Amino acid sequence: MQKIGIIILLTAAIIMQGFSQESSAKSQDGKKQGTAVNADENTKVSIGKNLLNIEEGDSSLNVRVGNRGLNILESLEGPKFNFKRYSENDEWNQDDTEDDRARRRNRFKGHWSGVEFGFNNFLTSDRSLVLPADIEYMTLHSGKSSNFNINFSQLSLGLTRHIGFVTGFGLNMNNYKFDRNNNILKGTNGIIEELNPGASLKKSKLATVYLNLPFMFEIQIPVDNNHLNIAAGPIGAVKIGSHTKMVYQDGQKVKANGDFSLNMLRYGATARIGYENFQLYGTYYMTPLFRTGKGPEGNDLYPFEIGVAFTFND
């Protein structure tokens, strides 16, 4: 994360420096370099092709950055603000009309980006919540085994106004909290084994972080002035982190990072149903939590999660 932050800061610094140099050069060269100052009462300044345009008149100010613009008009009632949207070759006087705004409102918008909170567990190979006797140490505290997801990127591909596909990226964070006084470790040949701490634990868990990529088909059913949303499709994920943690009764904490024979890649199916921006979701992974043959005593366990989501598709 620190490296990403440094890269962002350096990029911003380079861009700002470039703008500064470009603006300085253009102020010296005048119209030859794309900066124009009119001799009449209006003042126009432009940097690059539609990169930045500023036009000031007696009672108005137009500012355009890329394909977005803002018009400020002075009046007796006070300043009035109007937003504009331009195509590549639009002139200043082409406003973002009501038809344009209505057209954008009519576009299909899926329900993925947002935050999710739910509970997770896993099933055995025969799709049972009851674990074999020899791996009872994998039993989870179902009320405390939780997942938290941040879906930070979304792309909607509409077929009609209310039907289309939605995809994007999300961070999937799972906490598998053990119900018994134990944790796990990566044992001989990478097979997961029980870790007995030799002291009473307050809590113990396995935590994973995956980057998710869904591809869902969504139908939106109009209900009064709102919509009932139904979506489902495949989902893939890549692991970006995992660790175990134990907290003893005296407050001592022990954290261990490792891969714990977890599958690096996994896929499954996800579905959700909701009303406007409130959703109920469920995801089941057809890939075992641990690599085949490396699970507890060689058993395969298949993770799933259910919960609620609050989306930001507007």
Image (cartoon, rainbow, N blue to C red):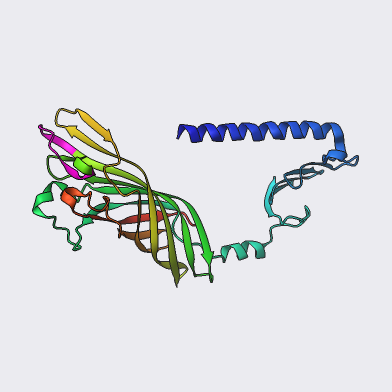
Q: Residue at x 19, y 58 (%)?
A: 124
The spot of residue 140 in percent (x, y) is 18, 49
Bounds of the magenta span?
Answer: 190-203
In the figure, residue 276 lies in which quadrant?
bottom left
Name the side, left or right, on which 108 lies relative to 49: left
Residue beneath the point at 47% across and 68% down: 225
How far across and how far down the image is residue 83, in percent?
67, 52
Check if residue 200 falls in the magenta segment.
Answer: yes
240 in the magenta segment: no
Q: Is residue 82 above or below residue 186?
A: below
Nearest to the observer: residue 110 or residue 277: 110
- Residue that extends furthest to the front in the rendered view of this protein: 189
Position above or below: 291 against 280: above
Q: Work out whether residue 37 can be spotted.
A: no
Q: Residue at x 33, y 48 (%)?
A: 148
Residue extending farthest to the right is: 39
Q: Is residue 9 above or below residue 70?
A: above
Residue 291 higher or lower than 215, as above or below:
above
Q: How many marks?
A: 0
Q: Position of residue 154 (x, y in %)?
A: 49, 55
Indicate the quadrant containing the N terminus: top left, top right, bottom left or bottom right. top left
Would residue 202 be seen by someone viewing this image from the given angle? yes
* Residue 193: percent from left, percent from top: 16, 43
Position of residue 75 in the picture relative to residue 146 (left or right)? right
